[in-house]
Image (cartoon, rainbow, N blue to C red):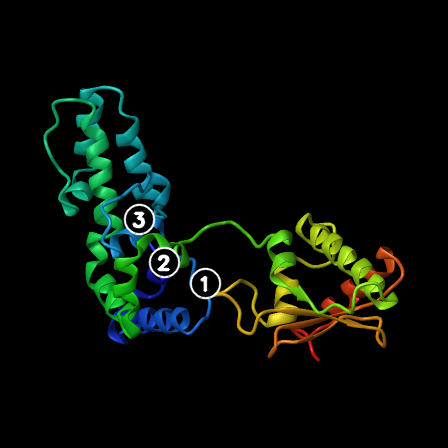
Amino acid sequence: MFLILQYDLFTAVREDEYYLAGKMIAVSIVHGGPGPHFLSEDLVHYLAGQPSFKATVSSITDEEIGKALQEIENAASVDALQECIMRHSTMLQTAGCLRHVAAVEAKKEIVSDYLHWYIIDRNSSVIDRFKDGLAALQFFTALQQHPALLSPVLTYFKKGLTALELERLFKPDLSPPGSNRRLKESKTLSYWADYLLDCEEGEGAVSVEEVLMFTTGLNSLPPSGLEPSPRIEFLDDSPFPMANTCSNTLKLPLLDTYTVFKTQMDFGLQNSPGFGCF
């Protein structure tokens, strides 16, 4: 199930918002914007034409249905299973899963079939319109041709941005080797790396995503990367960081100690209106 389906279904169908949602996602990704990262893995596999379906009872948000499936799943004997089936016969019949069972192992197939109906089959009309929207700019075709590459762009996952990813993302504009300024810049880069680690570990005033937002106006990395490539420049006339979100440029202050650097970075990022100003 994907989050759009939690919206008022009838309004969304009437106003064809599933098509519009698919189209917006396709246009965003093709033009270098972020992917949604809120679709279930099973739905994305279905969209991509892959047979894999691994949904569990925990995928069901309806408390009563989830409880009924859990009872079926926990049945320890054929008699117990048949009793569960009869008790929830209306629910199972609606999904076409009501059947006679001769072995307790049949419970797995019943639960799996119901989950497939609940997540995919009963939503087929809106999923089809969503697919029509994804077809904009040939994105849906690309998804089916390259599922391993594009499925992660759509699928929900909990992995956050890491300090190392952000550190590697920004390339510094450095002064000539051996110069006094180059020494200051190198020291500042070490402060920058330490600051990102503190942000990642929750020891800073902001998160790694907020650092990215300050510099680029985005809180996650687009699937196709950032253009222009993010750069780091250095400031000797301001104690606070500055940023140009149009050019993805972050300017770091040249300060003497990490303690001062961290304090000034925290203040600058916390007092920026969403993203940095140049």
Q: Nearer the viewer, residue 92 or 39?
A: 39
Q: CA distance from mark 3 to mark 1?
A: 20 Å
Q: Nearer the viewer, residue 71 or 52?
A: 52
Classify 10 as above or below 115: below
Residue 22 visible, this angle: yes
Q: Residues within 10 Å of mark 2 (few under 14, many from 20)?
A: many
Q: Residues within 10 Å of mark 3 (few under 14, many from 20)?
A: many
User: Secondary structure beneath disc 2?
Assistant: helix
> Along the polypeptide, which appears first: circle 2 or circle 3?
3
User: Secondary structure beneath disc 1?
Assistant: loop
Dividing the picture into quarters, in which one does residue 73 lie? top left
Count all numbered tags in the image, as a single digit: 3
Determine which residue is flagged by label 1. Answer: 223
- Residue type at mark 3 is Asp
Q: Is residue 106 left or right of residue 188?
A: left
Label placed on residue 150: 2
Dividing the picture into quarters, in which one does residue 55 lie? top left
Classify 49 as above or below 24: above
Determine which residue is flagged by label 3. Answer: 42
